[in-house]
Amino acid sequence: MAKPTDLVQGTLDLLILRTLTLQPMHGWGIAQRIRQVSREVLQVHQGALYPALHRLEQQGWIRARWGESENNRRAKYYSLTPDGAKYLRQEQAQWKRLSSAIGLVLEMS
Amino acid sequence: MRWYYKLPLRLRSLFHKNKAELDLDDELQFHLQNQIDEYVAQGMNPQEARRAALGSLGGVEQVKEECRDTRQVNFMDNFLQDVRFGSRMLRRNPGFTVLAILCLTLGIGVNAAVFSWVEGILLRPYPLVSNQERLVALAGTVRDQRDQTSWPDLLDVQRSCTLCETLFVSNITGATLSVGERAEVITGSIVSANYFDAIGVHPMFGRGFEPGEDTGRNAHPVVVISYHLWQTRFKGDAEIIGKTQRFDNVVHTITGVMPEGFYGTFVGRAMEYWVPASMVEAFYGGSGKLEDRGARWCEAYVRLKPGVTRNQMQQEISAIAARLEAEYPGTNRGRGIKVWPLWNTPFNHASHLLPTLEIMVVVAIFVLLIVCANVGNLLLVRSLARRHEMTVRLAVGAGRGRLLRQLVTEGLLLSGCGAAGGMLVAYWCRHSLVLLFPGDKLYLPGQMDGRVLGLSAAICAVVTLAVGLVPALQTRHLALADTLKTEASAVMGARGRAWFRSSLVVLQVTLSFTLLVGATLLMQSLRNIRTTSPGFSTTRVFDTSVSLATAGYDAPHAKTFQDELIQRVLALPGVEAAAYARVVPLSYGSFSSSPIAVDGYEPPPNGQSTDELYNEVGPDYFATMGIPLISGREFTRADDENAPRVAIVNQTMAARYWRGKNPIGQRLQVKGNWALVVGVVNDSKYYSLEEAPRPFFYVPLRQYFVIEPDIHIRTTQPLQSIQTALIREVRALDTNLALYEMITLQGLVDRSTSEQLAAVALVALFGGLALLLASIGLYGVMSCTVSQSTRELGLRMALGAGPSNLLRLVLSRGLLLTATGMMIGMALALLLTRLLGNLLYQVSPRDPLAFLGALAVMTFASLAACFFPGWRATRTDPIRALRAE
């Protein structure tokens, strides 16, 4: 059972958390939203999505509740906890610093 | 992150596993449906859409497993699975399981029982008493020899001691108690008034002693009684407080009843009553015991302040004792006070039992190690049989860590059952130490408290790891391809896999050999002691005494009574002789001692003391005891208080002080008075059978009178009838009197060697068990080797080896293991038998006979253990062995 590398995993967590700041969402919706927002660049593989959701839930950053979906099916909705929001802010700042640093290095020559 | 998010989730995963699983199912199902919808919207037909959706999800089960992993239920789940699987494996092999659990029960049980004894007798000997870890015992010393302390000295120590929290006196005493028809002698304590406050135990009703009740001669006849006494002798009378009761001849008011489970502060006896120190003379006789600094009768305990060490305490006490010595040279010259740890308290049974219990701890640990080696060996045999299973599990993808966990879980199951059984064994055995001291009426309770349980749990954990990891080491060697293909055949004496099992056997042999040496040494020593003549006859002489002092007799009355009683005793049928003596040898009583002087004898200049022991004895003492008179005469009725003082000396004394000259007719100074030596008698034993011959002398009882001497009776009658007759005669003279215990001198001899006997019994028992276990281990290894090397044996046979060659091959291999074990065992025994030092009598801890004996027993046992596998080797059918592969 190979696990995704830390970078990928951390990035996916970040994407999920960011997506959930808008509104509570189910797994399918999260995947769709990430795809749309990234203009079809980021395809979240379902095999990685659900373990990530469960992990985030275990860590207390998101919470799950059962609800009714748009097409009247029973769906599990995830929402951000205050702890999750705090974690997201930290990680976002970290990400910005990291990506601008990488940008600087790449545009050097 | 926060526990309140996590906890419900974890609990849900664990206890509502089905609910969590269904949720997961539903969630993935929802995803799948949405995916299908999307594909249908894109124009696929429903069946194609479904297949495509399943494909894109990438294996529903894998996703589920990964989600489960993040929930961390797998750990618990796997554990439960391991437990289920393990118990199934154990059930399938009942013989192995029962043997292993029995071994572990024995090993853990023995350790827990010994710990409970050490805890209950040495470390926390006094139930209910608070802060025992800070209690120490105080005893006096005179020129480095132990002595009691005096009441005024202790009061001074208490006043000026800054490091002690509290100091209290607790002396053992006895009293005749008559309630209704029954009179018996019961054991109690004479204590200082602060006793109950100091130990932190208070009467369950009534009161303890008030300050000042330990002052004033016989001023406060009050008594606190034990729960046991209250229940048995006073039938739990609820109105008991304020009632009066005769203890000896003094009427005491009962002021309190102690709670159940409190037995006082004396290792070896349960106390039944407590009286304040002001009553000491009613129980001990004498006068001025509370004021006289020279009257030494006190035994005391001190509780240190928190953080104070015994050494600091000793320094302060020594300083105080030195000041007292300077202040009162008349009574305190050469005297000090020594601090003793509780487990070595010199004035109760703690110090007697210490060496025995030390040996028991070592023996128990040995037994545990042997048991571990044996169970490890059993598991190894089984893991060989399970090699195929393990290999298959590895082959289908189990991690080695997972296998390890499985094996440790099985070890845990075994040691858990063993520990449960061991705890039961220990619980049943916690009071059984006293069984090793028959006829001594000792009270030696074990204590199963949290510390004992904790230690046992730690042992159980170590055992689990040991027995679980041993077979795990074996799986390290599993090479997948080899083992799956075929069982590789081993060769006799080949190195490799077998070395580990062999070294376990060597360990067992080593330890049991050491125990055997110890047992043999102790047995030799016991035989030496038991065959040592005490110097007096033991079988037909009885000893007892009459409670004259406690019944309030003064000297003139006592003299009349003693004369009348001995006349009546001599008139009894079967009585050959009878005599009084202050102290009976080999008992707990202490002989008098006095500095002596002899005409023409100059004490050596090195300051060696001329204090010698003596006994106050009546007429016919030597005839009654059967101590041969070498020259001169016995004491007679004429040697009374009006006659010139006389003395009789023993051989060693005659040789030391008169240097070969005949001492008869010479003068001897005792306590400042000159006495004429009238006889010389053979040496005998005085305090213990092990002691070296020492100078000793006797003086007439009438010239050094004591109110309550022992009476020795030589008779042809059995104990029962002489006892009945004596009680009748005593009652005829005074109905208030009671008889103390009656015992033959042989009984006293046996009692004085009971610690050695206990150690022998214990070490022999465990040595035997260890031998048995080691033989089983050796047998297991050898039969396993034989059955694994069938092919080689068949080949040898085909090449012309006869049965005797094969037998020799197997036996020599087994003996090699034994010999290695014995070599190491010999070295270990040489190191450890020094522990026996105090218990050995006229046996060197390196006695070659003991080592040879152990060697013979061990060799014989290992030959027996190897014989059956060897015999099976000779029965190998070469054709079948060769064709089998």
Image: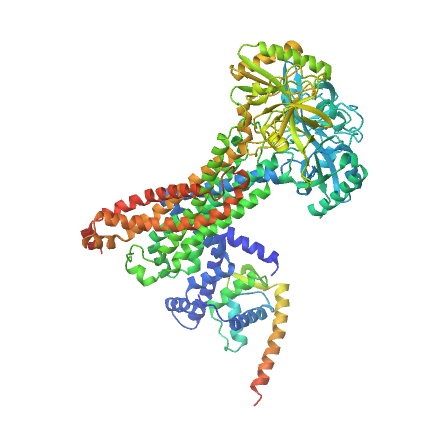
Give the quadrant of the C terminus of chain B.
Answer: bottom left
Up-down relation of residue A96 to residue B149 (above or below): below
| B510 on left or right of A94 | left
Give the x, y percent position of residue B437: 53, 30
Give the x, y percent position of residue B832: 50, 46
Name the residue: 38% across, 46% down: B777
Give the x, y percent position of residue B665: 65, 23
Give the quadrant of the N terminus of chain B.
Answer: bottom right
Name the residue: 54% across, 41% down: B837
Give the x, y percent position of residue B233: 64, 20
Q: Nearer the viewer, residue B607 or B736?
A: B607
| A64 on left or right of B732 | left
Q: Nearer the viewer, residue B771 or B686?
A: B686
Q: Is residue B537 visible?
A: yes
Q: Nearer the viewer, residue B701 or A18?
A: B701
Name the residue: 39% across, 49% down: B505
* Number of numbered discs on residues: 0
Tell me the quarter of the picture where residue B337 sits: top right
